[in-house]
Amino acid sequence: MSALFPRWTNTAYRLALGALFGVAPMLVVGLLIYVRTPWNTGQFEAVDQPVQFDHRHHVIDDEIDCVYCHRDVETSDYAGVPSTDVCMGCHAQVWNGSALLESVRRSYFSGQPIPWNRVHDLPDFVYFNHAVHVQRGVGCAACHGRVDEMARVLSTQPLTMGFCLDCHRRAGDLPERRSTTPPLEGADERAVQPALFGVVSEAADSALVLGPERVDSLTTCTACHR
């Protein structure tokens, strides 16, 4: 009596089991690794913008405060992108005939905002409040890097859940917040918010600067997922 299944089905069965218990888990692990890599997060990728805005010139050379342009960062969820009238407050007198500023002038007179391309883009299911972090003394450079040294802004941090949790856990470990990060070289040390220009101090191993009150670590799911 011949066998019910041909001999080659034994090999096919072994291959199917191998794929089920080997390839499938590797695929899942591979995807989990991929979403954390710069290929997915966009880390270190400079983003082209409709206007060639050089932060190095504006922050270092002209010593313009971050809040002058991102004026909502201390009071709102979003840091805000400056309206064109803020730009023209200076450029109505400075470089007012430059071809590089043609799109700025066009935006100003037409009332249409400049279509800036987002550099730091968190998923829609993540809640992040700029005002809470800035008012607690977290320097801009902790998440955005040394923007004052960038010709084109790029994301220097992965901004993954692990990155945020690591920072929150370090905050909970500090007995009290203290001034540990100096302002950017050449920037005006503002009495109200010197932490705005904060640079992460390697010695302090924390993004926190300035302030007497203790910071809660806030590592619960509802802190960021609301």
Image (cartoon, rainbow, N blue to C red):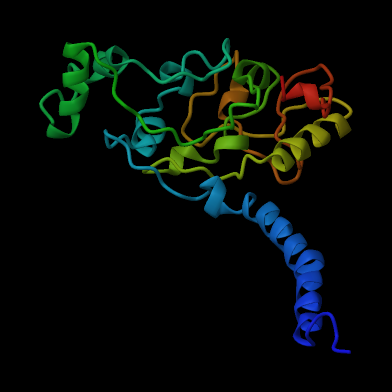
Q: Is residue 88 above or below residue 99?
A: above
Q: Is residue 7 left or right of residue 78?
A: right
Q: Residue at x 81, y 82 (%)?
A: 10
Expressed as whole percent of the image width and height from the top left, the position of residue 144 reads 55, 36
Expressed as whole percent of the image width and height from the top left, the position of residue 31 reads 66, 54
Q: Is residue 42 above or below residue 25?
A: above
Q: Quadrant of residue 97?
A: top left
Closer to the camera, 118 or 71?
A: 118
Q: Is residue 192 left or right of residue 60?
A: right
Closer to the camera, 194 or 26?
A: 26
Q: Quadrant of residue 222?
A: top right
Q: Residue at x 48, y 18 (%)?
A: 67
Q: Residue at x 81, y 80 (%)?
A: 5
Q: Residue at x 31, y 34 (%)?
A: 53
Expressed as whole percent of the image width and height from the top left, the position of residue 180 reads 72, 33
Closer to the camera, 67 or 157?
A: 157
Q: Is residue 206 above or below residue 195?
A: below
Expressed as whole percent of the image width and height from the top left, the position of residue 113 reads 29, 18
